[in-house]
Image (tube, helix red, strand yellow):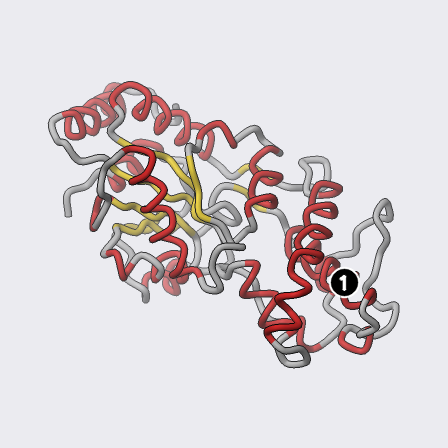
Amino acid sequence: MVAGNEAGNLCRKQAARKQNGSQNVKLLLFDIDGTLLRGHGRGKQALIEAMQASIDDRGCTHLFGAGEGRRALGEAPLAAPEVQTNPGMQNGIAGKTDLQFVHESLGPELTDAAIAEMIPQIFAEHSRRLREYFTAAAGVELLDGVRELLEEVQRLHRSGERCLPAVLTGNIQAGANIKLKVFGLEPYFVLGAYGDEGRVRRELPPIAVQRARDLTGRDFAGADVVIIGDTPNDIDCGRPLKARTIAVTTGPYARDELAEHEPHAIFDSLADTDRVLSAIFADD
């Protein structure tokens, strides 16, 4: 644990007692990129290259510029800005689903029907490229405090079934699994909702809630749903459910930008396990 002193131990015991004294179970929905891991643009690069490869196969090279920003599998990856050779590729991906990003990127030139037809090929190519260079050796980082927090959440889950750890991510499911496996994080989570299941992020929390209900037989609503993420979309996607939201500034957004969206708590990192747990299990 990050804080092993008596005060920290007392905080953890109080959180556990609070849960064990209640019938409520917290569904904890963790974002991945910028919250658990930092990929330095590798995920976005893989998705852009997957779109490029699929477009090339269909003779639409004008969308990206012939031959620019391309690499074959096995070649050294380009820096993320170099891949974005078309002005349409300048849009950000943080907080969006992969499905949303693909539609936004290709939508100006292709119909929804044409994009939908390309999606399986794009996502299969994306996964292949992600496996190749979304690695610790390529500079992917496990963010401070993440493993310690997940260890404690897992302990609480196993000891009292008072929380249910899950992922809520814009990544497609295959991509999420690839990313989590880089640092062996996948065993910490029992379910997820993914970026190939919703065009926008607000569509994902109800999917996670339904899966949690199917798994446990419990209804999750309001503050029993806790979303932890690093973007305004992570905060906003919980509003329809009146979920509790915890923001972290380890992604591309500053504290004041996240504060505008009124999360229940903001942290500079997840390194202070006890304070984060207190925010997760708070009553307000």
Q: Residue at x 39, y 27 (%)?
A: 2
Dot 1 alpha-carbon crowd within 10 angstroms: few under 14, some 14 to 19, many 20 or more: many
As drawn, 20 above or below 265 = above
Image vertical order of residue 193 relative to residue 242, above or below: above
Q: Is residue 127 above or below residue 67?
A: above
User: Residue 48 in the image: x percent, y percent?
Assistant: 70, 61
Say whether residue 260 is left or right of residue 174.
Answer: left
Q: What's the residue type where badge 1 is placed?
A: Ser
Looking at the picture, how far across and down is residue 116, in whole percent?
62, 66
Residue drawn at the location 58% of the way across and 72% of the way down: 104
Q: Which residue is mark 1?
A: 54
Compared with residue 40, is residue 95 higher up or lower down, i.e. above or below?
Answer: below
Which residue, as the protein is rendered here, is positioned at the far bottom? 108
Q: Nearer the viewer, residue 145 or 222?
A: 222
> Which quarter of the figure has residue 189?
top left
* Residue 237, percent from left and from top: 35, 59
Q: Is residue 149 visible?
A: yes
Q: Give the mark count.
A: 1
Where is residue 47? Give x, y as percent: 67, 57
Q: Quadrant of residue 13?
A: top left
Which of the image's four quarters has the N terminus? top left
What SS does tag 1 mark?
helix
Q: Would residue 82 be seen by someone viewing this image from the given angle?
A: no
Q: Residue at x 60, y 45 (%)?
A: 175
